[in-house]
Amino acid sequence: MTERAPWIVGVSGASGTPYAKAVLLGLLNAGHPVDLVISKAARLTLLDETGATVRDAHWKDDVATWLGENSGDLTYWPAGDLAAGPSSGSYPARGMVVVPASTAACAGIAIGLSKDLLQRAAEVNLKEHRRTVVVPRETPVTRSHLEHLLALHDAGAIVLPASPGFYGAGAAATAQQLVDFVAGKVLDALGVTHTLFARWTGELNAQRSPLGGP
Ligand SMILES: Cc1cc2nc3c(=O)[nH]c(=O)nc-3n(C[C@H](O)[C@H](O)[C@H](O)COP(=O)(O)O)c2cc1C
């Protein structure tokens, strides 16, 4: 039997829970096992942005309702469970993405605070030199935000701001296309195949370009 080596997905309390949903579905639909940790604050943003509630005792039904489909090979760990598998470097994991990443989570991970399982698991992934992607969502940013992101970069994380591109979809881009752009960039960073956005081919969209086209 081969060892289960999931991607750990940490959802922290920044705005942008639709990014988390798109990344989770991208990983699960590509057949990857996922371990999910949702911070206490992320429950508020999740409720506010999607109406979804995720309760530790009912996570299976709640996560399936949030994702809108079968949650596949998904394991859920309560954020307060510091004895959970992902809190140890010996736990087999492929890597981790924190999406969205609050400035508080970025700070906590950068300084090794480990105030909950999300922060501890991210710190463990960094110390084990596993692929770690952090998706910050805040604007504008202070010097300390930038310093924490630099510390994460220097520790080996890929800092991938929730900053969607408008090329491809253009001015008529839907919110879902912008979400998918960021989620697709996360999956690219993890090396996971997806079709969440059309790749740049070097051809400007002639209809939208003020320069016209051939
Ligand atoms: C509705 C709502 C939206 C928020 N949006 C952001 C945000 O976009 N970025 C951010 O860094 N913090 C945001 N916060 C604040 C964080 O939730 C707060 O700093 C919290 O302590 C983060 O904790 P966590 O990192 O453990 O999830 C928001 C809070 C609420 C209630």
Image: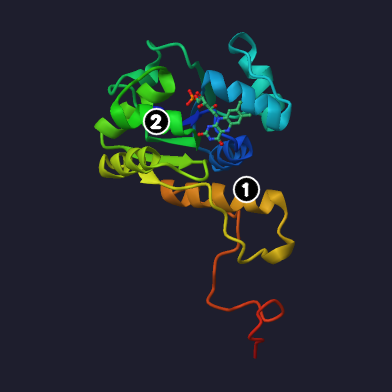
| Residue nearest the viewer, comparing 102 with 90 | 102
Which residue lies at the image location 61% right of the left edge and 8% below the top edge? 57
Q: Residue at x 60, y 78 (%)?
A: 204
- Circle 1: element type: helix
Which quarter of the picture shows residue 150? top left
Query: Image quadrant for the N terminus?
Result: top left
Please tell me how crowded label 2 is: few (under 14), some (14-19), or many (20+) other residues with Cα within 10 Å: some
Q: Position of residue 126 (x, y in %)?
A: 29, 34
Vertical position of residue 209 compared to residue 194: above or below: below
The amino acid on which the numbered mark 1 sits, given as a three-letter code, is: Val
Residue 191 percent across, percent down from the top left:
42, 49
Where is residue 12 drawn, in percent x and y? 51, 28
Q: Which residue is mark 2?
A: 5
Residue 56, which numbered label?
A: none
Q: Tell which tag, 2 or 1, sits nearer the viewer.
A: 1
Residue 6, visible in the rendered structure: no
Q: Quadrant of residue 49?
A: top right
Q: How many marks?
A: 2
Kindly check if marks 2 and 1 are in contact, taking CB atoms under 8 A apart as contact.
no
Give SS at disc 2.
loop
Callout 1: 10 Å neighbours few (<14), some, many (20+)? many
- Quadrant of the drawing holding the C terminus: bottom right
Question: Which residue is at 49% across, 33% downward?
Answer: 102
Residue 7 location in percent, x, y? 44, 33
Q: Which residue is at 28% across, 23% downward?
A: 89
Which residue is tagged 1?
179
Left or right, 25 with respect to 98, comes to right
